[in-house]
Image (tube, rainbow, N blue to C red):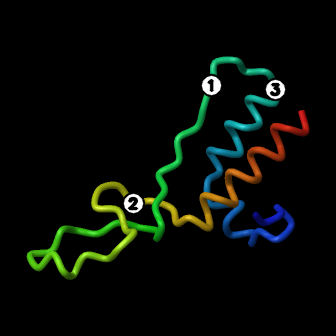
Amino acid sequence: MIAVTEIPIRILTYNPWLHSSIDQVLDYNHSIIGFMLESNIEEGNQQIPEDLSELKYGVSLTDACMNWETTEALLIEAAERLRAR
């Protein structure tokens, strides 16, 4: 596990909607009951090639996803902010 202080700034600004949602929860908005993060091992997405051996392991075939490093950083940040409440 990594500490928030070790997370690069680019990751923390990756999803401003998450920061906004956490702010709303911290302001006691009870209508927010969860967050959904589109995540995979590697970021982005890929088309299904004619030759399936060209598929990249850990890359989404549908929606573009953030990579695991970014997902972990966002979850850690969210948990620390919400626990501090």
- The kind of residue on which mark 3 rests is Asp
Looking at the picture, how far across and down is residue 56, in whole percent? 32, 77
What residue sits right under mark 3 in the picture? 27
Looking at the picture, how far across and down is residue 79, in whole percent? 77, 44
Q: Nearer the viewer, residue 12 or 6?
A: 6
What residue sits right under mark 1 in the picture? 33
Secondary structure beneath disc 1? loop
Compared across the picture, whether 45 is left or right of 7 comes to: left
Q: Is residue 55 above or below residue 1?
A: below
Label 2 environment density (alpha carbons within 10 Å; few <14, some 14–19, many ≥20)? some
Residue extending farthest to the right is 84
Q: Nearer the viewer, residue 38 or 14?
A: 38
Quarter of the figure with the C terminus: top right
Q: CA distance from mark 2 to mark 3?
A: 30 Å
Secondary structure beneath disc 2? loop
Residue at 62% x, 60% y is 14
**Earlier sequence position, callout 2 versus callout 1:** 1
Q: CA distance from mark 2 to mark 1?
A: 24 Å
**Earlier sequence position, callout 3 versus callout 1:** 3
Compared across the picture, whether 36 is left or right of 47 comes to: right
Label 3 environment density (alpha carbons within 10 Å; few <14, some 14–19, many ≥20)? few
Residue at 73% x, 30% y is 24
Secondary structure beneath disc 3? loop
Residue at 79% x, 21% y is 28
Q: CA distance from mark 3 to mark 1?
A: 13 Å
Label 1 environment density (alpha carbons within 10 Å; few <14, some 14–19, many ≥20)? few
Q: Nearer the viewer, residue 40 or 9?
A: 40
Compared across the picture, whether 1 is left or right of 83 comes to: left
Looking at the picture, how far across and down is residue 12, in whole percent? 71, 61
- The kind of residue on which mark 2 rests is Ala
How many marks overall? 3
What residue sits right under mark 2 in the picture? 64
